[in-house]
Amino acid sequence: MSEVAVMGAGAWGTALAIHAARLGHRVTLWARDAEHARAMAEARVNARRLPGQPFPEGMRATHDAAAVASARLVILAVPMQPLRQVLSNLPTALPPLLLACKGLEASTGLLPLEVLVQARPGHPTGILSGPNFAHEVAAGLPAASVVAAGDPALREDAQALLSGAALRLYASEDALGVQLGGAAKNVLAIAAGVATGAGLGENARAALITRGLAELSRLVVGLGGKAETAAGLSGLGDLLLTATGPGSRNTSLGIALGRGEALADILAARSSVTEGVATAPALLSRAAKAGVELPVCAAVAALLEGRLDVQGAVRALLERPLKAE
């Protein structure tokens, strides 16, 4: 058996820990909240974030960050915005890190691996991404993901450790493209949700998702990633799931916005993070520096910031100069 540590006891981190334990690995699940860790250790379930999915044998919960240092691989599944702080508080000696967060740091516009390079230069690392809802992975339903890293040995090791009968991992060397797909799809899913909530029809939603994919592809290629990454699991696959799945936090936020609810009220009623909200302006800034146009993402950002209402956002998109597809 190999030891895997998962840092971040949200739904996704817990699901990954459960999956790894089912593969026969000894797994440590770390939580920032000591009380949360204690409750999980006693009940052997994450009742707060992933109820109904008991921990398999060989999986334990802890608040002690030092407990992850002996693992063969550490999966860091924390929200994007606190990533830098979590990295700064980790033990000095750590095994390779596989980041399972999506988005851009709002204050800097950096992607997850770029934040890690600043916080822990030279540390071996990769990114895990793809079309995965936590509750389905925890339930053992079939799924696929991508593990991307510059180091072939790390890609292959993570792929071998985490692949099993219910989750198939594909390897990629395009970590940049994989990260950009994971960031952009959250913003585009908000747009798809707005179309649903505002009653704009299935034609509008299909058009938004399709043109959104075109934006995602331009962004990936424009910033140095590969076109095939945008068409793969971390691009098209994740966009389809996040923009159409009823369990998507970003889509549900868009639906609420489309129904006329205020953003502040929507966020205040949530205990989990909706990454697309912080990602939208950072993504636009990053794209602008590279000369990449993202009209759907720009409309979402304007809607979130209150510069446009839904009808204004629709007009802004439909009245743009005509062009070839």
Image: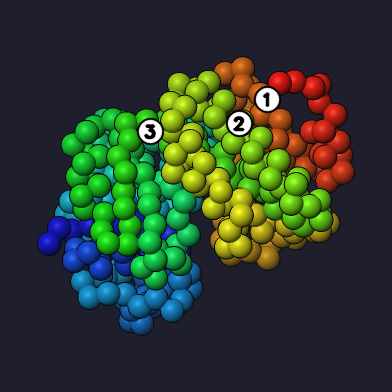
The residue identified by callout 2 is 214
The residue identified by callout 3 is 175
Residue type pointed to by label 2: Ala
Query: Residue 314: in sight, yes or no?
Result: yes
Q: Secondary structure at mark 3?
A: helix
For residue 283, which quarter of the picture? Answer: top right
Q: On the rendered structure, is 32 left or right of 263?
A: left
Q: Do the CB atoms of the residues marked 2 and 1 lie less than 8 Å apart? A: yes
Badge 1 crowding class, 10 Å Cα cut-off, few under 14, some 14 to 19, many 20 or more, is few
* Comes first in the chain, label 2 or label 1: 2
Q: Secondary structure at mark 1?
A: loop
Q: Residue at position x 65%, y 54% from top?
A: 251
* Comes first in the chain, label 3 or label 1: 3
Residue type pointed to by label 3: Ala
Numbered disc in front, either 3 or 1: 1
Q: Residue at position x 61%, y 50% from top?
A: 243
Q: On the rendered structure, is 145 left or right of 218?
A: left
Query: Which mark, by number, is residue 325?
Result: 1
Distance between the alpha carbons at the discs numbered 3 and 2: 19 Å
